Image (cartoon, rainbow, N blue to C red):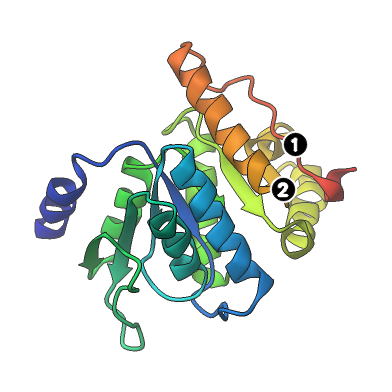
Amino acid sequence: MSEFVEGFGLLSELPRAVSVFGSARTPADHPHYAAGVAIGSALAQAGYAVITGGGPGAMEAANRGACEAGGLSVGLGIELPFEQELNEWVDVGITFRYFFVRKTMFVKYAQAFVILPGGFGTLDELFEAMTLVQTGKVTRFPVILFGSAYWSGLVDWIRDTMAATGTIGPRDLDLLTVTDDVAEVVAVIRAAEAGRSAGDNGGGMRAPLGPSDA
């Protein structure tokens, strides 16, 4: 309970924001890191705060891009035996003990999720977001997978196995956008925001799946 109170208190005045996820293991000289910097910068320039897990790798990249572009850079860390401190590009930071509290903060204060290539933790956050959107717990909430080469196999499996066997609905794939274009990331988020302002909860939203869906 104290973690919820502390998180709500720290983030209550946060402006509109986007949560960006990705691997802590992404090296600084990797194209995925450069993509994270570019996404963080573009979101900051569009007027969004950038929220990450506050760690190294892709999280650091997005925080760095936002910070260098003059935006607000937020880090929500987690206490783990092998985890590091919040990265140096975080302006507003907090470290949680419990994953479920941390994930609540990622969703509560964000208008969209951008998912860079990552591992089990990134997938956990991705499917948590997808479940919330699918069940209507959050509305008009874009979930954007950045890096079609990395994500295409997963998207193909969701479509060809899950959807084909009926374990998800035929329109559930429409909840995802796959892209390699930073400008499209911002455009999708802005379109969703405009839709919410117009009273559209996203029920008819169609998200392009990118190259693997061609």
What amino acid is found at the position of numbered circle 2 in the picture?
Answer: Thr
- Which residue is label 1 attached to? 208
Q: Quadrant of the C terminus?
A: top right
Residue 88 placement: quadrant = bottom left
Q: Residue 53: x and y, percent? A: 38, 64
Judged from the image, the secondary structure of the residue bearing numbered disc 1 is loop
Q: Residues within 10 Å of mark 1 (few under 14, many from 20)?
A: some
Residue sitting at 43 percent across and 55 percent down?
66
Is residue 117 in sight in this rendering?
no
Q: Is residue 68 above or below residue 142?
A: below
Q: CA distance from mark 2 to mark 1?
A: 8 Å
How many numbered marks appear?
A: 2
Q: Residue 51: x and y, percent? A: 38, 54
Q: Nearer the viewer, residue 162 or 81?
A: 81
| Residue 137 in the figure: left or right of residue 32 | left
What amino acid is found at the position of numbered circle 1 in the picture?
Answer: Pro
Q: Quadrant of the N terminus?
A: bottom left
Judged from the image, the secondary structure of the residue bearing numbered disc 2 is strand
Circle nearer the viewer, 2 or 1: 2
Residue sitting at 51 percent across and 20 percent down?
194
Q: Residue 148: x and y, percent? A: 76, 56
- Which residue is label 2 attached to? 179
Residue sitting at 74 percent across and 41 percent down?
166
Q: Quick one: which residue is furthest to the right in this view?
A: 214
Residue sitting at 50 percent across and 61 percent down?
124
Q: Residue 128: x and y, percent? A: 48, 51
Q: Earlier in the sequence, mark 2 or mark 1?
A: 2
Q: Nearer the viewer, residue 197 or 132?
A: 197
Is residue 211 in sight in this rendering?
yes
Q: Quick one: which residue is furthest to the top in this view?
A: 198
